[in-house]
Amino acid sequence: MRRKENMMPIQLSKYLDCDFLPSLKLIDSMGWSTVLVVDNLNPMEAEWLSNAIHDTGETEANSLCFEYQQEPDISRVKVGRDPLLNFACDNSYRYAMLVGLREDYLFYKDEANRFFLINGTESFLSKAYPCSKDTMELMFMSWADDSFQTDGESQFLLNIWDKYMKRE
């Protein structure tokens, strides 16, 4: 595990399941809910997430970035709109997570930039992504059902929706 100085060891298996997706066991044990968004993090979303993190009193987050079945690079990321956008862009080719220093939220993006998840309390999520589940589903499904998606890609996205959002 590659990590910066003064960082505690972090095990990916605590946060991820065998499919390299955020663990439902962790989400349930933390009492978190999930926001699921198709596509890349955009400036507005980065600002919302930054504001929600700042409201927790934190100005940094633990960063875990890795390629499939590889050891993660672990560091700290300053929290702000631009640093969060840079984080997503700099890790556009690999899985990337931000975990609160007190582990009170988790941001995850997949390696192909197809979607991102934010996990946390309802209060945190209402600030991090102020959107109803109904609108979130409308946006997600319109992307998943778009004609430019292959059948396999559409099914993958629908399976992600079912895994995280149908259970709530």
Image: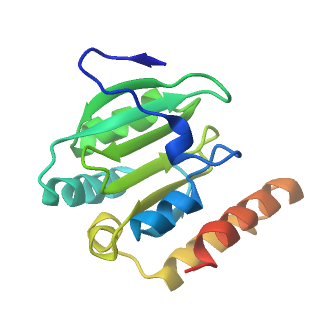
Colour option used: rainbow
Closer to us: 89 or 7: 7
Question: Which residue shows up at 50% across the image and 58% down it?
Answer: 26
Question: Which residue shows up at 59% across the image and 44% down it?
Answer: 110
Picture coordinates of residue 59, whole percent (x, y): 15, 43
- 87 versus 159 height, above or below: above
- Please state if 160 lies on the left or on the right of 48 as rendered: right
Closer to us: 148 or 21: 21
Picture coordinates of residue 61, whole percent (x, y): 27, 40
Q: Residue furthest bottom?
A: 134
Picture coordinates of residue 161, whole percent (x, y): 65, 68
Q: Residue furthest right?
A: 151
Visible residue check, residue 148: no
Picture coordinates of residue 125, whole percent (x, y): 34, 69
- 127 versus 25 height, above or below: below
Q: Residue furthest left?
A: 57
Closer to us: 85 or 50: 50
- 86 versus 126 height, above or below: above
- Please state if 167 lies on the left or on the right of 7 as rendered: right
Q: Quadrant of residue 154?
A: bottom right
Q: Quadrant of residue 66?
A: top right
Question: Where, quadrant-wise, is the C terminus in this rendering?
Answer: bottom right
Visible residue check, residue 112: yes
Q: Quadrant of residue 152?
A: bottom right
- Please state if 51 lies on the left or on the right of 126 as rendered: left
Tally the marks: 0
Question: Which residue shows up at 68% across the image and 62% down it?
Answer: 160
- Please state if 140 lies on the left or on the right of 27 as rendered: right
Question: Which residue shows up at 42% across the image and 51% down it?
Answer: 107
